[in-house]
Image (cartoon, helix red, strand yellow):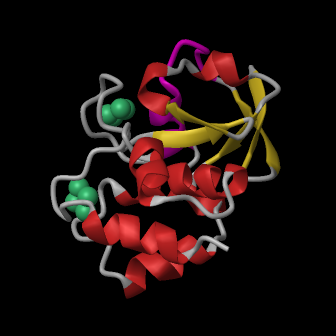
Amino acid sequence: MVQFTLNGRRVSFEGSGSRRLLDVLREDFRATGTKEGCGEGECGACSVLIDGDVVDSCLVAVGQVEGRDVLTIEGLSSPLQQAFIEHGAAQCGICTPGMLLAAHVLLQRTTRPSADDVREALAGNLCRCTGYTKIIEAVLSCGT
Ligand code: FES
Ligand code: FES
């Protein structure tokens, strides 16, 4: 059994600890906001926060999160979400949960990031649709 905190709630997973966290989140906990893109740690669509750090959940076995704190997009409440809507920063939306989580961590660590800070923070999150400009604008609008 693997026990961890998911979006602020203590949860238990009874299956194999070697299953991918991505699959357990989507299939067992219905946290389907976490997306699969490449499945190889390249695209960031599967990003979640583990103890506050951005991690590709396709590369993590669920057994590795024993006792840890996992946040998915379902647990995020941030002005970034409204900003993405207002700036048209989401199109197909596959990248969006990971973008939001990575941007959230950036804003926690850097209250007024530059455009370069945003580009760097989102470098592990690929987007095929938006050209990034609107995403960067949305994140910058949330700097304080
Ligand atoms: S699906 Fe995990 S990084 Fe692409
Ligand atoms: S909105 Fe489609 S991949 Fe980013």
Q: Is residue 124 left or right of residue 63?
A: left
The number of callouts visible is 0
| Rendering coords of residue 44 (x, y %) | 38, 39
Where is the N terminus found, in terms of image quarters? top right
**Residue located 57% across and 74% down the image:** 142
Within the magenta stretch, is there residue 22?
yes
For the C terminus, the quadrant is bottom right
Q: Is residue 32 visible?
A: no
Q: Quadrant of residue 90?
A: bottom left
The residue closer to the viewer here, 70 or 32, is 70
Counting from the top left corner in percent of width and height, residue 95 is at: 33, 53
Side of 3 where 20 appears, left or right: left
Name the image quarter holding residue 86.
Answer: bottom left
The answer to which quarter of the image holds residue 137 is bottom left
Magenta stretch: give its range: 15-28
* Residue 51 visible in image: yes
Left or right side of 107 for 100:
left
Residue in the picture at 46% in, 31% down? 56
As drawn, 71 above or below 137: above
Between 51 and 102, the one lying in front of the other is 102
Q: Residue placed at 23% from the left, 70% from the top?
A: 91
